Structures are given as structure tokens and as C-alpha cells.
Image: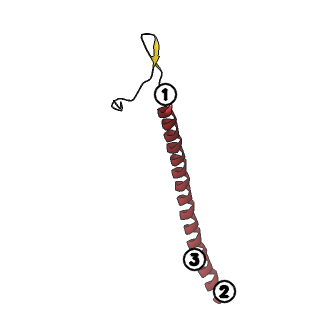
Amino acid sequence: MQVRQWITARQSELDALAEQLQDVQVERDELAIAERVLNRLAEQAERAQAEAATPVSAKVAGRAVATCARGSAAW
């Protein structure tokens, strides 16, 4: 009888561990998704900064002029 009790107890322990493992796998999947989203946002922010830092060329009466963002003119 002791062996059967031990087997039953061990099966319960392993079932609990299997449930914990499944929870860990779900959390890892969620973290992987969050990491991909964070990487995309960082790439978008880098592109936006690069675009903002690139001067815009403009011409007035056929001559090149410097442009400035609206409201940022320091006169």
C-alpha cells in the first residue's frame, strides 16, 4: 500500500509542476510579444528622430532657403 500512496503523491506533485510549467511558458510567450512590440516602437522612434533631424530643402524664387519648424523661429 505504501508504494501506491507514494505513486499517487508523486503523480500529484508532477501534475502541479506541469501546471506551473505551462504558466511559465504562457508568460514567456507574452514577454516575447512585448519585446517585439518594444523593438518596433524603438525603431519607429529612431526613424522619427532621423527624419526630424534631416533638414528640409526648400526654394523661394528659385533660390535655396533654410526652413524652420512652425513657431520655432528665433527672431
Residue 42, relative to residue 14: is it above or below?
above
Residue type, mark 3 in image: Ser
Q: Residue at x 54, y 59 (%)?
A: 26
Mark 1 vs mark 2, CA separation in Å? 79 Å
Q: Which element is circle 3 on?
A: helix
The first of marks 1 and 2 along the sequence is 2
Residue, disc 3: 12
User: Do the residues bearing badges 1 and 3 touch, measured as CB atoms within 8 Å?
Assistant: no
Residue, disc 2: 3
Between label 1 and label 3, give the one nearer the viewer: 1
The first of marks 1 and 3 along the sequence is 3
Residue 14, relative to residue 57: is it above or below?
below
Q: Which element is circle 1 on?
A: loop
Nearer to us in this view, 72 or 34? 72
**Looking at the figure, which quarter contains the C terminus?**
top left
Q: Residue at x 54, y 46 (%)?
A: 39
Residue, disc 1: 55
Between label 2 and label 3, give the one nearer the viewer: 3
Using a 10 Å C-alpha cutoff, classify the residue at mark 2 as few (fewer than 14 neighbours), some (14 to 19) or many (20 or more).
Answer: few
Residue 6's spot in the image, x, y percent?
Answer: 63, 84
User: Which of the 4 image quadrants contains residue 25?
Assistant: bottom right
Mark 2 vs mark 3, CA separation in Å? 14 Å
Report the side of 13 relative to 65 (left or right): right
Q: Which element is circle 2 on?
A: helix
Mark 1 vs mark 3, CA separation in Å? 67 Å
Q: Residue at x 42, y 10 (%)?
A: 61
Residue 58, relative to residue 27: is it above or below?
above
Callout count: 3
Residue 34's spot in the image, x, y percent?
Answer: 51, 51
